[in-house]
Image (cartoon, rainbow, N blue to C red):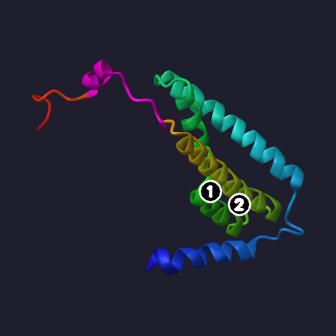
Amino acid sequence: MSFAFFIPVYFAIVGLKLDLVRGLSLKMMAAFILGSCIVKILSVSLAAHFAGFRGLDLINLALTTNARGGPGIVLASVAFDAGIISPQFYTTLVIAAVITSQIAGAWLDYILRKGWPLLAPLPCDEVEATRPLASEVV
């Protein structure tokens, strides 16, 4: 019921609150999207590198975790309804959530169409090392 009715109604209400004529600041939107994407992609890439990921795996993880999606829109709506943020910043946050989600989806589609793995498989000895021993399984 929620997927068929309540969620679409919620996002329709979010869309009705957007004022793309007076509530859109292109400078703010460009600065926020560019700045937040750079920080998020660099921080996820660094963390993934420390976790042992390399090459295309770093890019895949960084671009997919960069997506703000529905939670970003919900957070923007709550902050806007509470009067914490301006209409311009609300519009910026909603558009950033949509754009970053579209970028992540397009990137994953590109990777899968090329036939590349989303994450490289572990070598056999690393897989064996990550499996629990029979005595550890309860």
| Kind of residue at disc 1 | Gly
- With 102 as the anchor, is 118 left or right in this view? left
Residue furthest front in the image: 114
Q: Position of residue 10 (x, y in %)?
A: 60, 75
Assign the C terminus to one quadrant of the image. top left
x and y, in percent, of residue 4 in the image: 49, 78
Which corner quadrant of the image does residue 121 belong to? top left
Q: Position of residue 73 (x, y in %)?
A: 64, 61
| Dot 2 crowding, Cα within 10 Å, few <14, some 14–19, many 20+ | many
Circles 1 and 2, Cβ within 8 Å, touching? The answer is yes
Q: Is residue 110 left or right of residue 23?
A: left
Residue 136 quadrant: top left
Mark 1 / mark 2, whichever is N-terminal: 1
Query: According to the image, label 1 marks what residue?
Result: 72
Of 113 and 27, the residue lying toward us? 113
Tell which of 117 and 22 is nearer to you: 117
Residue found at the very far top of the displayed protein: 125
Residue 101, label in figure = none
Residue 109's place in the image compared with 40, above or below, is below
Name the residue rendered at 58%, 48% in the picture. 109
Tell me if mark 1 has few (under 14), some (14-19) or many (20+) residues whose alpha carbon lies within 10 angstroms of its own. some
Residue 85 visible in image: no
Q: Which residues are magenta?
A: 117-130
Marks 1/2: CA–CA distance = 7 Å
Residue 65 painted magenta: no
Q: Look at the picture and state if 103 lies above or below 48.
A: below
Residue position marked by numbered label 2 in the rendering: 94
Instruction: Look at label 2 and name its amino acid.
Output: Val
**How far across and how far down the image is residue 29, in percent?**
81, 52
Which residue occupies the foreground of this view, 3 or 55?
Answer: 55
Q: Is residue 138 above or below residue 127?
A: below
